Protein backbone atom coordinates (compact mmCIF):
# COMPACT_ATOMS: atom_id res chain seq x y z
CA UNK A 1 0.00 0.00 0.00
CA UNK A 2 1.28 3.49 -0.88
CA UNK A 3 0.56 6.75 0.93
CA UNK A 4 -1.66 7.78 -1.99
CA UNK A 5 -3.80 4.66 -1.61
CA UNK A 6 -3.89 5.19 2.16
CA UNK A 7 -5.17 8.75 1.67
CA UNK A 8 -7.82 7.50 -0.76
CA UNK A 9 -8.86 4.95 1.87
CA UNK A 10 -9.20 7.69 4.51
CA UNK A 11 -11.27 9.82 2.15
CA UNK A 12 -13.59 6.97 1.25
CA UNK A 13 -13.86 6.03 4.91
CA UNK A 14 -15.02 9.55 5.82
CA UNK A 15 -17.61 9.52 3.04
CA UNK A 16 -18.75 6.04 4.03
CA UNK A 17 -19.23 6.94 7.68
CA UNK A 18 -21.09 10.14 6.77
CA UNK A 19 -23.53 8.21 4.58
CA UNK A 20 -23.71 5.24 6.95
CA UNK A 21 -24.55 7.48 9.89
CA UNK A 22 -27.89 8.25 8.26
CA UNK A 23 -28.96 4.61 8.54
CA UNK A 24 -26.82 2.89 11.19
CA UNK A 25 -27.00 3.99 14.87
CA UNK A 26 -23.50 2.70 15.66
CA UNK A 27 -21.93 4.59 12.77
CA UNK A 28 -23.90 7.68 13.79
CA UNK A 29 -22.33 7.49 17.25
CA UNK A 30 -18.89 7.26 15.61
CA UNK A 31 -19.55 10.42 13.59
CA UNK A 32 -21.35 12.47 16.26
CA UNK A 33 -18.73 11.62 18.87
CA UNK A 34 -16.03 13.26 16.76
CA UNK A 35 -17.85 16.51 16.05
CA UNK A 36 -15.95 19.52 17.38
CA UNK A 37 -13.48 17.08 18.90
CA UNK A 38 -10.59 19.55 18.85
CA UNK A 39 -12.64 22.25 20.59
CA UNK A 40 -13.58 19.71 23.26
CA UNK A 41 -9.97 18.65 23.72
CA UNK A 42 -8.71 22.23 24.02
CA UNK A 43 -11.43 23.10 26.52
CA UNK A 44 -10.68 20.05 28.68
CA UNK A 45 -6.95 19.36 28.68
CA UNK A 46 -4.63 21.88 30.40
CA UNK A 47 -1.63 22.92 28.33
CA UNK A 48 0.78 22.24 31.20
CA UNK A 49 -0.39 18.66 31.93
CA UNK A 50 2.06 15.76 31.84
CA UNK A 51 0.20 13.24 29.73
CA UNK A 52 0.48 9.55 28.94
CA UNK A 53 -1.72 8.82 25.94
CA UNK A 54 -3.09 5.31 25.43
CA UNK A 55 -5.12 4.46 22.35
CA UNK A 56 -7.34 1.39 21.99
CA UNK A 57 -9.62 0.28 19.19
CA UNK A 58 -12.43 -0.96 21.42
CA UNK A 59 -13.34 -2.69 24.69
CA UNK A 60 -11.17 -5.77 24.20
CA UNK A 61 -8.05 -3.71 23.62
CA UNK A 62 -8.91 -1.52 26.61
CA UNK A 63 -8.95 -4.62 28.83
CA UNK A 64 -5.41 -5.31 27.59
CA UNK A 65 -4.28 -1.75 28.21
CA UNK A 66 -5.98 -1.31 31.56
CA UNK A 67 -3.39 -3.14 33.72
CA UNK A 68 -0.69 -0.92 32.22
CA UNK A 69 -2.65 2.26 32.93
CA UNK A 70 -3.17 1.28 36.54
CA UNK A 71 0.45 0.29 37.08
CA UNK A 72 1.69 3.56 35.54
CA UNK A 73 -0.72 5.56 37.71
CA UNK A 74 0.93 3.95 40.74
CA UNK A 75 4.48 4.49 39.49
CA UNK A 76 3.95 8.02 38.16
CA UNK A 77 1.04 9.64 40.04
CA UNK A 78 2.01 13.09 38.75
CA UNK A 79 1.12 12.03 35.18
CA UNK A 80 -2.35 12.23 33.67
CA UNK A 81 -3.83 9.48 31.51
CA UNK A 82 -5.59 10.31 28.25
CA UNK A 83 -7.48 7.30 26.91
CA UNK A 84 -8.83 7.35 23.35
CA UNK A 85 -10.93 4.94 21.34
CA UNK A 86 -11.69 4.28 17.71
CA UNK A 87 -15.07 2.61 18.30
CA UNK A 88 -18.20 3.84 20.09
CA UNK A 89 -18.47 0.58 22.05
CA UNK A 90 -15.10 1.15 23.71
CA UNK A 91 -15.81 4.80 24.39
CA UNK A 92 -19.24 4.16 25.90
CA UNK A 93 -18.18 1.18 28.02
CA UNK A 94 -15.45 3.17 29.79
CA UNK A 95 -17.27 6.37 30.70
CA UNK A 96 -17.23 5.45 34.39
CA UNK A 97 -13.62 4.25 34.39
CA UNK A 98 -11.68 6.20 37.01
CA UNK A 99 -8.21 5.08 35.94
CA UNK A 100 -8.09 7.59 33.08
CA UNK A 101 -8.22 11.35 33.60
CA UNK A 102 -9.81 11.96 30.20
CA UNK A 103 -11.59 9.68 27.73
CA UNK A 104 -12.16 10.77 24.13
CA UNK A 105 -12.63 9.46 20.63
CA UNK A 106 -9.44 9.58 18.59
CA UNK A 107 -9.88 11.92 15.61
CA UNK A 108 -9.65 10.07 12.31
CA UNK A 109 -6.11 9.83 10.96
CA UNK A 110 -4.83 12.48 8.58
CA UNK A 111 -1.82 14.77 8.28
CA UNK A 112 -3.53 17.91 9.61
CA UNK A 113 -5.76 16.18 12.15
CA UNK A 114 -2.95 14.15 13.73
CA UNK A 115 -0.71 17.24 13.93
CA UNK A 116 -3.42 19.30 15.62
CA UNK A 117 -4.27 16.50 18.06
CA UNK A 118 -0.65 16.15 19.19
CA UNK A 119 -0.26 19.93 19.51
CA UNK A 120 -3.19 20.00 21.93
CA UNK A 121 -2.34 17.03 24.13
CA UNK A 122 1.50 17.20 24.06
CA UNK A 123 1.98 13.60 25.32
CA UNK A 124 5.17 12.49 27.09
CA UNK A 125 4.56 8.82 26.23
CA UNK A 126 2.23 7.13 23.72
CA UNK A 127 0.98 3.55 24.03
CA UNK A 128 -0.99 1.87 21.25
CA UNK A 129 -2.70 -1.44 22.00
CA UNK A 130 -2.62 -4.55 19.81
CA UNK A 131 -3.75 -3.67 16.27
CA UNK A 132 -3.75 0.12 16.02
CA UNK A 133 -1.68 1.36 13.06
CA UNK A 134 -2.42 4.87 11.80
CA UNK A 135 0.17 6.22 9.38
CA UNK A 136 0.03 9.95 10.11
CA UNK A 137 -0.26 9.60 13.86
CA UNK A 138 2.77 7.33 13.95
CA UNK A 139 4.71 9.62 11.64
CA UNK A 140 3.97 12.77 13.66
CA UNK A 141 4.73 11.05 16.98
CA UNK A 142 8.09 9.88 15.65
CA UNK A 143 8.84 13.32 14.21
CA UNK A 144 8.25 14.89 17.63
CA UNK A 145 10.53 12.31 19.24
CA UNK A 146 7.80 11.17 21.65
CA UNK A 147 8.39 7.67 23.07
CA UNK A 148 5.98 5.27 21.37
CA UNK A 149 5.30 1.62 22.23
CA UNK A 150 2.92 -1.05 20.98
CA UNK A 151 1.65 -3.54 23.56
CA UNK A 152 -0.10 -6.94 23.45
CA UNK A 153 0.53 -7.11 19.71
CA UNK A 154 0.04 -10.33 17.82
CA UNK A 155 0.99 -11.05 14.21
CA UNK A 156 0.36 -13.82 11.69
CA UNK A 157 1.98 -14.44 8.33
CA UNK A 158 -1.32 -13.61 6.61
CA UNK A 159 -1.06 -9.94 7.59
CA UNK A 160 -0.03 -7.32 5.04
CA UNK A 161 3.14 -6.47 7.00
CA UNK A 162 4.66 -9.67 5.63
CA UNK A 163 3.44 -9.44 2.03
CA UNK A 164 5.14 -7.92 -1.01
CA UNK A 165 2.62 -5.05 -1.00
CA UNK A 166 3.08 -4.25 2.70
CA UNK A 167 5.83 -1.64 2.45
CA UNK A 168 3.78 1.13 4.07
CA UNK A 169 2.63 -1.18 6.86
CA UNK A 170 6.23 -2.22 7.57
CA UNK A 171 7.22 1.42 7.66
CA UNK A 172 4.55 2.06 10.29
CA UNK A 173 6.08 -0.61 12.50
CA UNK A 174 9.48 1.10 12.39
CA UNK A 175 7.95 4.17 14.06
CA UNK A 176 7.63 2.31 17.35
CA UNK A 177 10.43 2.43 19.88
CA UNK A 178 9.41 -0.99 21.15
CA UNK A 179 6.86 -3.59 20.11
CA UNK A 180 5.72 -5.96 22.85
CA UNK A 181 4.26 -9.10 21.28
CA UNK A 182 2.19 -11.87 22.80
CA UNK A 183 4.12 -14.89 21.52
CA UNK A 184 7.30 -16.22 19.94
CA UNK A 185 5.70 -16.68 16.53
CA UNK A 186 4.94 -12.96 16.34
CA UNK A 187 8.54 -12.15 17.27
CA UNK A 188 9.89 -14.48 14.57
CA UNK A 189 7.77 -12.73 11.96
CA UNK A 190 9.03 -9.29 13.02
CA UNK A 191 12.62 -10.56 13.24
CA UNK A 192 12.31 -11.72 9.63
CA UNK A 193 11.56 -8.17 8.43
CA UNK A 194 14.44 -6.64 10.37
CA UNK A 195 12.69 -5.54 13.55
CA UNK A 196 14.38 -7.83 16.09
CA UNK A 197 16.01 -4.87 17.88
CA UNK A 198 12.65 -3.37 18.84
CA UNK A 199 10.68 -6.56 19.50
CA UNK A 200 10.13 -8.17 22.91
CA UNK A 201 7.96 -11.14 23.86
CA UNK A 202 5.99 -9.92 26.88
CA UNK A 203 2.81 -11.97 26.66
CA UNK A 204 -0.78 -10.80 26.82
CA UNK A 205 -1.75 -8.29 29.51
CA UNK A 206 -5.29 -9.72 29.54
CA UNK A 207 -4.00 -12.50 31.80
CA UNK A 208 -2.92 -9.91 34.36
CA UNK A 209 -6.29 -8.22 34.07
CA UNK A 210 -8.44 -11.31 34.64
CA UNK A 211 -6.26 -12.42 37.55
CA UNK A 212 -6.71 -9.00 39.13
CA UNK A 213 -10.49 -9.20 38.68
CA UNK A 214 -10.57 -12.68 40.22
CA UNK A 215 -8.49 -11.54 43.20
CA UNK A 216 -11.02 -8.79 43.94
CA UNK A 217 -14.13 -10.92 43.40
CA UNK A 218 -17.11 -10.19 45.61
CA UNK A 219 -20.31 -12.27 45.83
CA UNK A 220 -23.59 -11.25 44.22
CA UNK A 221 -26.40 -12.02 46.69
CA UNK A 222 -29.12 -12.25 44.03
CA UNK A 223 -27.08 -14.81 42.12
CA UNK A 224 -26.45 -16.88 45.24
CA UNK A 225 -30.18 -16.88 45.96
CA UNK A 226 -31.15 -17.79 42.39
CA UNK A 227 -28.75 -20.73 42.17
CA UNK A 228 -29.42 -22.25 45.56
CA UNK A 229 -27.96 -25.77 45.52
CA UNK A 230 -28.36 -26.31 41.76
CA UNK A 231 -25.62 -27.00 39.28
CA UNK A 232 -25.31 -24.02 36.96
CA UNK A 233 -24.24 -23.10 33.45
CA UNK A 234 -23.04 -19.50 33.14
CA UNK A 235 -23.19 -18.44 29.48
CA UNK A 236 -21.51 -15.16 28.62
CA UNK A 237 -21.45 -12.93 25.52
CA UNK A 238 -24.05 -15.08 23.79
CA UNK A 239 -25.57 -14.54 20.36
CA UNK A 240 -28.90 -15.91 19.04
CA UNK A 241 -27.25 -19.13 17.85
CA UNK A 242 -25.85 -19.78 21.33
CA UNK A 243 -29.14 -18.90 22.99
CA UNK A 244 -31.16 -21.30 20.85
CA UNK A 245 -28.71 -24.12 21.61
CA UNK A 246 -28.84 -23.42 25.35
CA UNK A 247 -32.63 -23.16 25.30
CA UNK A 248 -32.92 -26.58 23.67
CA UNK A 249 -30.50 -28.05 26.20
CA UNK A 250 -32.34 -26.55 29.16
CA UNK A 251 -35.74 -27.72 27.91
CA UNK A 252 -34.44 -31.29 27.86
CA UNK A 253 -33.95 -31.31 31.63
CA UNK A 254 -36.56 -31.58 34.31
CA UNK A 255 -37.59 -28.36 36.03
CA UNK A 256 -34.82 -26.79 38.11
CA UNK A 257 -32.44 -29.74 37.83
CA UNK A 258 -29.94 -27.21 36.48
CA UNK A 259 -29.90 -23.41 36.31
CA UNK A 260 -28.79 -21.20 33.43
CA UNK A 261 -27.39 -17.70 33.88
CA UNK A 262 -27.40 -16.00 30.50
CA UNK A 263 -25.47 -12.79 29.80
CA UNK A 264 -26.22 -11.90 26.15
CA UNK A 265 -23.82 -9.86 24.04
CA UNK A 266 -26.61 -7.54 22.93
CA UNK A 267 -29.02 -6.15 25.53
CA UNK A 268 -31.16 -3.84 23.41
CA UNK A 269 -34.90 -3.95 24.01
CA UNK A 270 -35.68 -5.97 20.89
CA UNK A 271 -33.22 -8.72 21.73
CA UNK A 272 -34.30 -8.91 25.36
CA UNK A 273 -37.93 -9.30 24.31
CA UNK A 274 -36.87 -12.14 22.02
CA UNK A 275 -35.14 -13.83 24.95
CA UNK A 276 -38.25 -13.47 27.07
CA UNK A 277 -40.16 -15.47 24.44
CA UNK A 278 -37.36 -18.01 23.98
CA UNK A 279 -37.03 -18.64 27.72
CA UNK A 280 -40.59 -18.34 29.09
CA UNK A 281 -39.53 -19.63 32.53
CA UNK A 282 -36.73 -17.05 32.80
CA UNK A 283 -36.52 -13.98 35.00
CA UNK A 284 -34.54 -10.83 34.20
CA UNK A 285 -31.89 -9.68 36.66
CA UNK A 286 -33.42 -6.19 36.83
CA UNK A 287 -36.75 -7.74 37.87
CA UNK A 288 -35.39 -10.42 40.17
CA UNK A 289 -36.35 -10.36 43.83
CA UNK A 290 -35.34 -12.82 46.52
CA UNK A 291 -38.76 -14.42 46.50
CA UNK A 292 -38.80 -18.20 47.13
CA UNK A 293 -41.58 -18.62 44.55
CA UNK A 294 -39.47 -16.97 41.85
CA UNK A 295 -36.40 -18.94 42.89
CA UNK A 296 -38.23 -22.24 42.65
CA UNK A 297 -39.96 -21.60 39.31
CA UNK A 298 -37.28 -19.82 37.26
CA UNK A 299 -34.59 -21.99 35.67
CA UNK A 300 -32.94 -19.17 33.73
CA UNK A 301 -31.70 -15.77 34.86
CA UNK A 302 -31.10 -13.27 32.05
CA UNK A 303 -28.57 -10.55 32.80
CA UNK A 304 -29.93 -7.35 31.27
CA UNK A 305 -27.02 -5.07 32.21
CA UNK A 306 -23.35 -4.59 31.34
CA UNK A 307 -20.42 -5.10 33.68
CA UNK A 308 -21.31 -8.19 35.72
CA UNK A 309 -20.06 -10.99 33.50
CA UNK A 310 -16.53 -11.28 34.86
CA UNK A 311 -17.97 -11.85 38.35
CA UNK A 312 -20.68 -14.23 37.17
CA UNK A 313 -18.28 -16.84 35.80
CA UNK A 314 -17.25 -17.69 39.38
CA UNK A 315 -20.72 -19.24 39.84
CA UNK A 316 -20.59 -21.67 36.94
CA UNK A 317 -20.38 -25.42 37.30
CA UNK A 318 -19.68 -25.03 33.60
CA UNK A 319 -18.86 -21.78 31.83
CA UNK A 320 -19.99 -21.24 28.25
CA UNK A 321 -18.43 -18.51 26.11
CA UNK A 322 -20.53 -17.30 23.21
CA UNK A 323 -19.63 -16.37 19.65
CA UNK A 324 -18.21 -19.70 18.56
CA UNK A 325 -21.25 -20.57 16.46
CA UNK A 326 -20.82 -17.58 14.15
CA UNK A 327 -18.09 -16.36 11.84
CA UNK A 328 -16.87 -13.59 14.17
CA UNK A 329 -15.68 -16.18 16.68
CA UNK A 330 -15.62 -16.59 20.44
CA UNK A 331 -15.48 -13.80 23.01
CA UNK A 332 -13.18 -13.51 26.04
CA UNK A 333 -12.27 -16.98 27.28
CA UNK A 334 -9.85 -15.87 29.97
CA UNK A 335 -12.40 -14.25 32.26
CA UNK A 336 -14.29 -17.56 32.20
CA UNK A 337 -11.21 -19.76 32.73
CA UNK A 338 -9.57 -17.80 35.55
CA UNK A 339 -11.96 -19.15 38.20
CA UNK A 340 -10.96 -22.76 37.64
CA UNK A 341 -14.15 -23.83 35.89
CA UNK A 342 -14.39 -25.92 32.68
CA UNK A 343 -15.13 -23.77 29.64
CA UNK A 344 -17.13 -24.79 26.56
CA UNK A 345 -17.43 -22.93 23.24
CA UNK A 346 -18.37 -23.45 19.62
CA UNK A 347 -16.16 -24.40 16.66
CA UNK A 348 -15.04 -20.93 15.52
CA UNK A 349 -12.00 -20.39 17.74
CA UNK A 350 -8.87 -21.11 15.64
CA UNK A 351 -7.67 -17.48 15.53
CA UNK A 352 -7.51 -17.29 19.33
CA UNK A 353 -4.26 -18.64 20.77
CA UNK A 354 -5.69 -18.99 24.26
CA UNK A 355 -8.53 -21.20 22.97
CA UNK A 356 -6.10 -23.52 21.23
CA UNK A 357 -3.87 -23.66 24.31
CA UNK A 358 -6.76 -24.34 26.69
CA UNK A 359 -8.00 -27.20 24.51
CA UNK A 360 -4.50 -28.68 24.35
CA UNK A 361 -4.26 -28.51 28.15
CA UNK A 362 -7.75 -29.99 28.58
CA UNK A 363 -8.96 -26.84 30.30
CA UNK A 364 -11.62 -26.25 27.66
CA UNK A 365 -13.62 -28.16 25.08
CA UNK A 366 -15.05 -27.07 21.75
CA UNK A 367 -18.14 -28.60 20.18
CA UNK A 368 -19.21 -28.67 16.54
CA UNK A 369 -22.97 -29.08 16.99
CA UNK A 370 -25.76 -29.35 19.56
CA UNK A 371 -25.50 -33.08 20.19
CA UNK A 372 -21.80 -32.81 21.00
CA UNK A 373 -22.48 -29.89 23.35
CA UNK A 374 -25.13 -31.93 25.13
CA UNK A 375 -22.71 -34.83 25.63
CA UNK A 376 -19.97 -32.57 27.00
CA UNK A 377 -22.29 -30.61 29.27
CA UNK A 378 -23.90 -33.75 30.68
CA UNK A 379 -20.52 -35.30 31.37
CA UNK A 380 -19.26 -32.23 33.24
CA UNK A 381 -22.48 -31.76 35.22
CA UNK A 382 -22.69 -35.40 36.22
CA UNK A 383 -19.01 -36.09 37.00
CA UNK A 384 -17.54 -33.63 39.49
CA UNK A 385 -14.02 -35.07 39.23
CA UNK A 386 -13.88 -34.52 35.47
CA UNK A 387 -15.18 -30.96 35.85
CA UNK A 388 -12.74 -30.23 38.69
CA UNK A 389 -9.70 -31.52 36.78
CA UNK A 390 -10.66 -29.59 33.66
CA UNK A 391 -11.23 -26.39 35.62
CA UNK A 392 -7.91 -26.81 37.43
CA UNK A 393 -6.08 -26.98 34.09
CA UNK A 394 -7.87 -23.82 32.92
CA UNK A 395 -6.87 -21.86 36.01
CA UNK A 396 -3.26 -23.09 35.88
CA UNK A 397 -2.97 -21.97 32.26
CA UNK A 398 -4.14 -18.44 33.07
CA UNK A 399 -1.83 -18.13 36.08
CA UNK A 400 1.19 -19.36 34.12
CA UNK A 401 0.75 -16.66 31.46
CA UNK A 402 0.77 -13.69 33.85
CA UNK A 403 3.47 -11.03 33.92
CA UNK A 404 3.19 -9.00 30.69
CA UNK A 405 2.33 -5.79 32.54
CA UNK A 406 5.49 -6.06 34.64
CA UNK A 407 7.65 -6.57 31.54
CA UNK A 408 6.17 -3.54 29.76
CA UNK A 409 6.23 -1.13 32.70
CA UNK A 410 9.71 -2.38 33.60
CA UNK A 411 10.91 -1.36 30.14
CA UNK A 412 9.39 2.08 30.57
CA UNK A 413 11.16 2.51 33.92
CA UNK A 414 14.52 1.13 32.80
CA UNK A 415 14.64 3.27 29.67
CA UNK A 416 13.49 6.44 31.44
CA UNK A 417 11.01 7.08 28.66
CA UNK A 418 9.47 10.08 30.38
CA UNK A 419 12.74 11.96 30.74
CA UNK A 420 14.64 11.13 27.54
Image (tube, grey):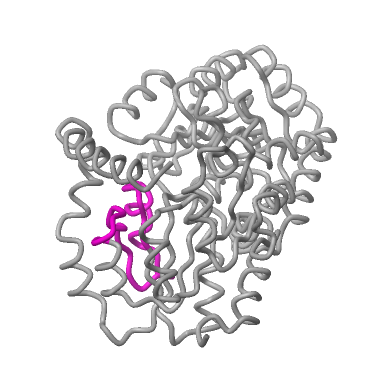
Q: How many marks on residues?
A: 0
Write the start and end of the magenta stretch as one range: 84-113
In the image, 208 versus 41, the foreground residue is: 41
Query: Would residue 112 be counted in the magenta stretch?
Result: yes
From this viewpoint, is residue 15 visible? yes
Q: Residue at x 48, y 28 (%)?
A: 298
344 relative to 102, above or below? above
> Viewed as shown, does residue 420 lie left or right of 84?
right
**Where is residue 26 drawn, in percent x and y?**
27, 39
Quadrant for the N terminus in the image:
top left
Decide which of 33, 127 is in the foreground and name it: 127
The percent coordinates of residue 217 (x first, y second) are 59, 59
> Left or right of 364: which side holds 67?
left
Q: Position of residue 50 (x, y in %)?
A: 38, 83
Classify residue 125 as left or right of residue 347. left
Give whichever of 279, 68 is nearer the camera: 68
**Res 26 visible:** no
Query: Left or right of 105: which side holds 1?
Result: right
Asked which quadrant contains residue 17, the reply is top left
**Location of residue 384 by image quarter:** top right
Residue 311 magenta-highlighted: no
- Residue located 22% across and 33% down the image: 24
Residue 342 position, x and y percent, is 72, 37
Amino acid sequence: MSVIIYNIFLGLFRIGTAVGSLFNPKIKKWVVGRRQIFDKLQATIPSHAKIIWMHCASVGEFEQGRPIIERLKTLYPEYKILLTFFSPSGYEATQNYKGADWIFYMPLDGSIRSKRFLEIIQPRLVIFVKYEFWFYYLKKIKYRNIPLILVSAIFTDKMSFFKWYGQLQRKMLTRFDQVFVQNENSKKLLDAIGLSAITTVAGDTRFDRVLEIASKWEPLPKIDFFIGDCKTIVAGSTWPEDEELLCNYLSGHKENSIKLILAPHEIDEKHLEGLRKLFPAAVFYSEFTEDPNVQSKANCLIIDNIGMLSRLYKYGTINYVGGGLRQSGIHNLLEAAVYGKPVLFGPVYKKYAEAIALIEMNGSKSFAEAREFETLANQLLEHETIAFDMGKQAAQYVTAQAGATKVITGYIQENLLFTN
